Image (spheres, rainbow, N blue to C red):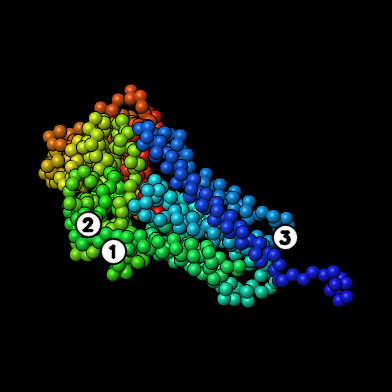
């Protein structure tokens, strides 16, 4: 009998079962991600089908289909904590197993994180999901991935310190790939702080993409055991993202820019591309530079809401944009993707009354809804308010159908010498010089935003009871006013609060934070439904 047989000793390969024990937990996270996607899309589907079939909006189903981000992240934290600690009996002995597991968990969360920012335009379930609603979840899930990666990195650092081999281990090629990715994540977390992200958004965007690709490619080589299946899935999603951005696009080669001296806005007219589908009111497109331009590959695409409606049968797509956010060159080609819907389709067939308030370039969101209801659902009471800081911005009214829109000019910056400053009334054809000099109202948050509502219109709070506005003579299709609107006054006319079906009475807001906040409060006090559009990274 041999010595091994006599002492009854079992020999196991190095690492034993610990080397592969975590593989299954990666697939558990992937399964949870699939459940998340199915529940998300399924709840949206049920919500909209019920709304379409009954013609009545369900507040309960809306709540279940739009669970707050903090609730979703809290559930994911619990899930990760459970998976990360499953069958770990002695952390002091098995901390390396935990380190490996959290590294695998981080990588297996990436497919869900990429899925949340995909932007296909012709897939039904994505129209339900509406990718802008996923951006906040994408940001927080990214932070959760970074946290898992930190647990993995810090734990291994502690292990190497105990072994006295930190430098030696760190510079081994496969380990170094993980170290590089981790430090990229550290920098990304710092520059993703809101104030830095907004101030240096282009840099943040470029670094974000570098980190994302590094995570997918370098960790696929770094991970042991391998993560080839997950890596292929991540690559497939990234390649699909590139396909949507550069291949599934419309070419734009004819742009007309309409400007006005002193205005903060521009009107952009784009010829409707061939085979471009019809779009719902308040849908948006995204513009990118041509593939020949390096900016197309390193900078983000720019979203713009379509200010016109399909029912106009015009050859142009009109955009109302804030100057200096995207430099339009009439001699340059662009790539266009979209349209991306915002308001759910059943809204347009079930609304009983609609009140809209917009600030600055936010008019591009509210105006198509206003015109669609006027054109296709003439029996629905609808009111629309547009607040602008400068009278010069009202040049937009001469180029688009804004019949019936009440315009509020909150601040007049110019006054011609020799003109009386006592006048508080004007018509669309009046000179700026005839307008009264008003104080500049400032809101607290004037940070630059990036996206659909990139706007720094300065508005004081709209709470009733404060200084009101003075009505100007109605000598045209529009009503022009000086000052700030009182929502109780401007929305009460032709929109009685005695409407019983308040589940289908809507208030829509688009503009600065204070405007959205006050419109939401007004709607909540009257038990109206509320929808607002705000896009920012």
Q: What is the total number of numbered labels drawn onto the structure image?
A: 3
Looking at the picture, does residue 533 appear above or below residue 235? above
Q: Residues at badges 1 and 3 in contact (C-beta under 8 Å)?
A: no
- The quarter of the picture where the N terminus appears is bottom right
Location of mark 1 (residue)? 289
Marks 3 and 2, how far apart in space?
65 Å
Q: Residues within 10 Å of mark 3 (few under 14, many from 20)?
A: few
Residue 153 appearing in the image:
yes
- Mark 2 = which residue? 274
Which of the 4 image quadrants contains residue 58? Answer: top left
* Residue at the image position 55 percent from the left and 53 percent from the top: 31
Determine the secondary structure under disc 3. Answer: helix
The CA span between labels 2 and 1 is: 19 Å
Q: Please tell me whether mark 2 sits on a helix, a strand or a loop.
A: loop
What label does residue 55 carry, if any?
A: none
Q: Position of residue 531 (x, y in %)?
A: 36, 39
- Residue depicted at 66% across the width and 70% down the height: 160
Q: Earlier in the sequence, mark 2 or mark 1?
A: 2
Name the residue: 18% across, 42% down. 401
The single residue placed furthest to the top in the displayed view is: 498
Residue drawn 52% across and 57% down? 109
Q: Is residue 224 left or right of residue 494?
A: right
Question: At which x and y percent is residue 524?
Answer: 40, 32
Q: What residue is pinned by disc 3?
A: 92
- Looking at the rendering, which quadrant does residue 427 occupy? top left
**Which tag is nearer the camera, tag 3 or tag 2?**
2
Asked which secondary structure carries label 1, the reply is: strand
Residue 57: x and y in percent read: 38, 34
Give the crowd class for mark 1: few <14, some 14-19, many >=20 residues within 10 Å: many
């Amino acid at each position: 009998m041999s010595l091994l047989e006599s002492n009854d000793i079992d020999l196991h390969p190095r690492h034993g079962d610990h080397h592969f024990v975590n593989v299954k937990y990666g697939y558990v996270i992937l399964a949870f991600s699939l459940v998340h996607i199915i529940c998300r899309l399924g709840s949206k589907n049920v919500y909209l089908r019920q709304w379409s079939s009954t013609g009545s909006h369900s507040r309960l189903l809306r709540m279940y289909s739009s669970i707050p981000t903090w609730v979703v992240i809290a559930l994911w934290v619990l899930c990760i904590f459970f998976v990360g600690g499953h069958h770990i009996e002695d952390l002091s002995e098995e901390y390396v197993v935990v380190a490996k597991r959290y590294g695998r968990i981080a990588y297996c969360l990436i497919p869900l994180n990429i899925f949340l920012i995909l932007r296909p335009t012709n897939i039904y379930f994505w129209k339900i999901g509406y990718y802008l609603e996923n951006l906040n979840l994408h940001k927080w899930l990214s932070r959760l991935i970074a946290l898992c990666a930190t647990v993995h990195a810090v734990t291994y650092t502690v292990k190497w310190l105990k072994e006295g081999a930190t430098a030696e281990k760190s510079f081994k090629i496969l380990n170094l790939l993980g170290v590089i990715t981790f430090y990229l994540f550290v920098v990304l977390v710092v520059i993703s702080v809101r104030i830095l992200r907004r101030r240096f958004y282009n840099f943040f965007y470029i670094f974000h993409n570098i980190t994302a690709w590094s995570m997918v490619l370098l960790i696929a080589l770094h991970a042991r055991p391998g993560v080839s299946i997950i890596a292929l899935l991540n690559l497939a999603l990234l390649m699909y993202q590139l396909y949507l951005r550069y291949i599934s696009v419309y070419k734009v080669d004819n742009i007309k820019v309409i400007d006005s001296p002193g205005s903060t806005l521009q009107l952009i007219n784009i010829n409707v591309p061939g085979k471009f589908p019809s779009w719902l009111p308040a849908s948006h497109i995204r513009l990118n530079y041509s593939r020949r331009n390096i900016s197309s590959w390193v900078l983000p695409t720019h979203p713009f809401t379509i200010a016109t409606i399909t029912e106009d049968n015009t050859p142009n797509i009109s955009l109302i944009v804030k100057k200096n956010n995207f430099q339009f060159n009439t001699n340059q080609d662009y790539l266009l993707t979209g349209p991306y819907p915002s308001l759910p389709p059943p809204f347009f067939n079930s609304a009983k009354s609609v009140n809209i308030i917009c600030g600055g370039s936010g008019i591009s969101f509210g105006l198509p809804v206003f015109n669609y209801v006027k054109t296709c659902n003439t029996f629905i009471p609808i009111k629309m308010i547009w607040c602008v800081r400068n009278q010069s911005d009202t040049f937009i009214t001469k180029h688009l159908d804004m019949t019936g829109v009440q315009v509020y000019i909150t601040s007049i910056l110019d006054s011609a010498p020799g003109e009386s400053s006592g006048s508080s009334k004007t018509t669309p054809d009046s000179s700026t010089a005839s307008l009264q000099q008003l104080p500049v109202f400032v809101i607290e948050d004037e940070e630059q935003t990036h996206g659909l509502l990139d706007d720094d219109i300065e508005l004081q709070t709209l709470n009733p009871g404060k200084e009101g506005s003075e009505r100007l003579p109605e000598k045209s299709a529009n009503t022009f006013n000086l000052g700030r609107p009182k929502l109780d006054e401007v929305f009460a006319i032709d929109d009685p609060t005695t409407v019983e079906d308040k589940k289908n009475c809507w208030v829509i807001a688009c503009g600065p934070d204070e405007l959205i906040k006050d419109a939401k409060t007004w709607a909540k006090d009257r038990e109206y439904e509320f929808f607002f559009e705000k896009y920012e990274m």
